Amino acid sequence: MIVMKNVYKKYPNGVVASNGIHVEISKGEFVYVVGPSGAGKSTFIKMMYREEVPTSGLIFINGTELSKIRSKDIPYFRRQIGVVFQDFKLLPKLTVYENVAYALEVIEEAPSVIRQKVTDVLKLVGLTNKMRMFPNELSGGEQQRVSIARSIVNSPKLVIADEPTGNLDPETSWEIMKIFERINAQGTTIVMATHNREIVDTQKHRVIQIEGGLITRDEYEGEYRNEI
Amino acid sequence: MKYRTFRRHLRESFKSLSRNGWMTFASVSAVTVTLLLIGVFFIIMMNLNQLADNIENDVEIKVVAEPDANRVQVQELLKRVKKTPGVEEVTYFTRDQELEKMIESFGDELALHKQSNPLGDALYVKASNPQETATIAKEISTYEYIYDVEYGEGKVEKLFKVLKVGRNVGLTLILALLFTAMFLISNTIRLTIVARRTEIDIMKLVGATDNFVRIPFMLEGVWLGILGAIVPMVVITTSYARLYSVWDDKLQNQLFKLLDPSPFLFQLNFLLIFIAVFIGVWGSFMSVRKFLRV
């Protein structure tokens, strides 16, 4: 599903966020990406949906080599993966329903299909009764659920989440995690950058630790560890 | 693009118009105010231009034939003048008719001259291009049987110079106003789009193509333009029609007549709506383009 070979990323300001990363993530896996702030987690995540481009090295997602994608084809590539952001990134002028539907409108799906899929996915994240509301009328947890609903509505094989619980209280974080577990159980690969020790240590999955732009630990059923 | 996607864009553009209430209002007001200015200024300039045309067309050359030239010779002269290049129209008055005109203007004392009319026959010559009046007058004065050629030498040249400067100033002002309008309107639209920059970022992250992001914004630009053009068009049309009817009643047969509203207002309204829509679309296009590179 995801293969990174010797990926190196240096920003124009001289910061090296990725210093030769090798990693392979298979289909259906649930992976936590942990590490201190500024270690290169976000860059690692952003390179997967091509918001950042590596300075050198190869990244394959679903068999596609990302540096080979022409910029006009990037939208089509992004439709294959769902992305969940720490700050939700919802369209403020659209309702909950419209925000989720947007991901299907861009692929020119038929209106009847859109209606069906959006209704289904909103039921999955428990927001059926709030679908006519605007994002600013929702709590943080609810907004994150909208963001998740949008990321999975066109059934991507890969969902990437950048600190999805970063802005949420513990209780809401657990609800969000339950949704991710459910999605993963359906066979979707999930890569999640997180700072949440409790979650990582309780819901055991593969843990990749990044420090100084390098993978310093990669364990199946791993723990968050103290030294981070 | 599928037809239903286009319909979606249309729907989306209308929705966005109403959901961005204040920004819509700001853009529409900018369009309204500038178009009103352009419209009024345009009316003034076009009418002044018309006035200048009228003045120019009033300029003519008076050719007086030798008083002792006979009928055949005058006819010959008339033929020759008519054939002069650049001459559009020649009106012929006999010496008796000329005297009648003088008596009408200056009084009956002149009637004494009816016995022995000292005047020559007169030809009033109009140039097809008024600017060539002087050249034509010079050419005609070389002909035979000529007593005098007058066209207001010196004054006409000065008049033409003034009119030319006036026209150039008007044209420059209109162009300057148009550019200011374009700048002002597209800048307002740009500001409203800058405020929505994150929206564009998000759309692109969710997998929207550039066109999918851009088209609703451009359609919105069209509606902004049309909405903004309504008030200026209505105001200008009604007030000009009213002004024309009042003016026309009071100043019949004067040198300065207002342009006929019938083709003029259509042209003006067409111009206004064209400017509005063009600037709306162009402003949106340019502003969105800046933020599409995600």
Image (cartoon, coloured by chain):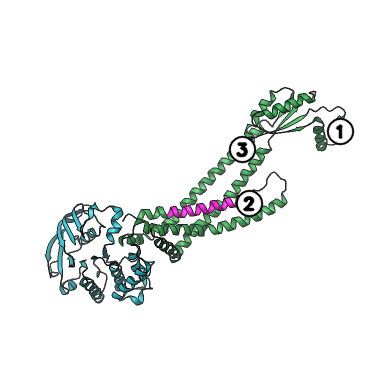
Describe the element under mark 1 as helix, strand or loop. Answer: helix
Dot 1, how many residues are within 10 Å of its Cα: few (below 14), some (14-19), or many (20+)?
A: some
- B194 left or right of A182? right
- Earlier in the chain: of badge 2 and badge 1, it is 1
Residue that badge 2 annotates: B262
Question: Chain A rendered in what hue?
Answer: cyan
Residue that badge 3 annotates: B162
The answer to which of B158 and A131 lies nearer the viewer is A131
Task: Tell if the residue under mark 2 belongs to the same chain as the one under mark 1.
Answer: yes
The spot of residue A213 in percent (x, y) is 16, 58
**Residue B278 sits inside the magenta stretch:** yes
The spot of residue B89 in percent (x, y) is 69, 34
Q: Quadrant of the N terminus of chain A?
A: bottom left
Asked if residue B71 can be seen in this view, the reply is: yes
Residue that badge 1 annotates: B111
Asked if residue B66 can be seen in this view, the reply is: no
Q: Is residue B69 above or below residue B224?
A: above
- Earlier in the chain: of badge 2 and badge 3, it is 3
Pointer 2 and pointer 3: residues touching (CB < 8 Å)? no
How far apart in space, not on screen, are marks 2 and 1 (Cα)?
Answer: 48 Å
Question: Which stretch appears magenta?
Answer: B259-283
The answer to which of B294 and B150 lies nearer the viewer is B294
Describe the element under mark 2 as helix, strand or loop. Answer: helix
How far apart in space, not on screen, are marks 2 and 3 (Cα)?
Answer: 29 Å
Q: Residue at x 71, y 30 (%)?
A: B150
Callout in the foreground (3, 1): 1
